[in-house]
Image: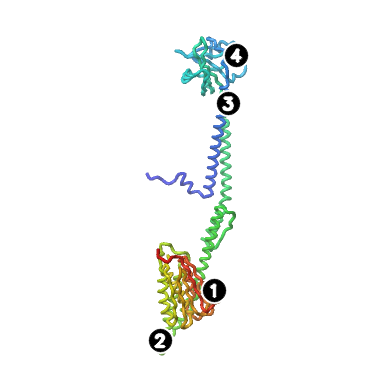
Amino acid sequence: MPRRPGGPAAWYRARSLRTRLTFLTAAAVAVAIALSALACWFIVEERMYGVVRSDLQSVRGRGPLPNSKDCATTPQAALKNVQNSNLQPTAGAPAPRDTQFVFGGQVTVVCLPPAATRAIVVEAGDAKAMGLKPGQSLIRDGHYTNGDPAMVRITLVQDPGYPPALIMIASPTEAIDESLRQLALVLGGVALGGVILAGVAGRLVARSALKPVDQLTDAVEHIARTEEVGTTIPVHGEDEIARLSTSFNSMSTALANSRERQTRLIADAGHELRTPLTSLRTNVDLLIRSDETGRPLPPATRSKLLGSLKAQMQELTVLIGDLLQLSRPDSPRPVRTLAVVAVHELAARAVERAELRGPGLVFETSVAPWYVHADAAALERAVINLLDNAVKYSPPGGSIEVRLDRGVLTVRDHGPGIPPDELPYVFDRFWRSPSSRQLPGSGLGLSIVAQSVREAGGEVSLGPAPDGGPGALATVRLPGGPSPT
């Protein structure tokens, strides 16, 4: 038959974290109390029986040998003989120690002193005491003939004229057993009370310890219900719960920043897309209206409109490509997608494309071999964007200097440069200098440069020309080496 799910493990997993913590606390305290109670009981037992054992070991002397009339083949019969021979009963409580003699032979003979009130049960293993040396003794647990427990000391004696005999001296242990039973009841009650108190304390501790977790749960449920990212919870202390709360606050803040960047990107993209789309719609409407009214536009005007449509479509295509480039996560790509990229070859190809876009410009190129682990397409797009930016702001007939030396790529133009107050914003998405709003572009090129270089593990900066002359200097630092290995 298939085994049905259930059992203690399933019950435990089905409980809440607070209940499980309470259960574990109570269980741990119960085990600790149980072990302590057992240890206490065994220690007390050993000490109490040790006192009796020491008392028996300290007994010296044995008294006179008994009369033959107080002897019999069994302890019960010997005790009966002693009782019959004593006309007056012994007054007071039984003696703390009882003595009897056992003579070995073909028939075992047990003798008791005249004042004996109890007899000790002789066990089969007592015969081995005959092999003891004088002065040696052994101690064992035993019983009186009436069933009361006792501890018995057995010693071998050899007197002239008498056969070897065993002297059995016993101390009753009934009081000790009763004390141990009472101690067990007391310890059991204490353990039970401790477990109950541990359960109550565990519940209180669990409620207090899990309060930050409840706050965290409430915050997560609030975000899931309202989709309001950015919610944080207070952090107290430096323990694991505080670290969890801090991590949650960091995650929530990062999600809020990510949503804000996404919202800003959508808003900026919509703003940038509105201009080319409006221009496209205006030109298309003009062409459609000329055909509907039967008044065709002059060939030159129509050719100009078509050229404008083509340019606007190209601008829109570039803008959409830039948006797709920036839609990738800001975090670096996994290492498995990276490859060894020859930056000097990549820069040479980018310069060739830039020369086509700026036919009247002079490019001064000096590149040394340099290899990095990066996304080749993204890094090439970044270099092309830097050169396009230099071409766009270079005056007719101007020069552009491209240098690559030990992993540092610099692009220098001789245009108007960048005002110092605008330098902090040059890598922001959709940011465009007020003085260059009339020039084509979407304000995304340098943002793509910054993202691609960052993904390659490098740094990029843009500032004024180092010699104080006209133009701007873009610097890209890439980790790597002069060889592909």
In the rendered view, would you say 389 is above or below 190?
below
Secondary element at image label 2: helix
Q: Nearer the viewer, residue 299 or 404?
A: 404
Dot 2 amino acid type: Ser
Q: What is the x, y in percent for residue 309?
A: 42, 82
Q: Nearer the viewer, residue 293 or 157?
A: 157
Question: Would you say the residues marked 1 and 2 are in contact, meaning their CB atoms lie under 8 Å apart?
Answer: no
Q: What is the x, y in percent for residue 445?
A: 47, 74
Q: Which residue is mark 3?
A: 51
Secondary element at image label 1: helix
Secondary element at image label 3: helix
Inter-mark Cα distance, 1 to 4: 121 Å
Q: Residue furthest right?
A: 92
Dot 1 amino acid type: Leu
Inter-mark Cα distance, 4 to 3: 30 Å
Q: Which residue is mark 2?
A: 303
Inter-mark Cα distance, 4 to 2: 147 Å
Q: Residue at x 55, y 72 (%)?
A: 424
Q: Which residue is mark 4?
A: 89
Secondary element at image label 4: loop
Q: Residue at x 54, y 73 (%)?
A: 423
Q: What is the x, y in percent for residue 432?
A: 52, 76
- Mark 2 or mark 3: which comes first in sequence? 3
Q: Nearer the viewer, residue 306 or 159?
A: 159
Q: What is the x, y in percent for residue 185?
A: 57, 33
Inter-mark Cα distance, 3 to 1: 94 Å
- Mark 4 or mark 3: which comes first in sequence? 3
Q: Which residue is mark 1?
A: 423
Inter-mark Cα distance, 2 to 3: 123 Å
- Mark 3 or mark 1: which comes first in sequence? 3
Dot 4 amino acid type: Pro
- Mark 1 or mark 4: which comes first in sequence? 4
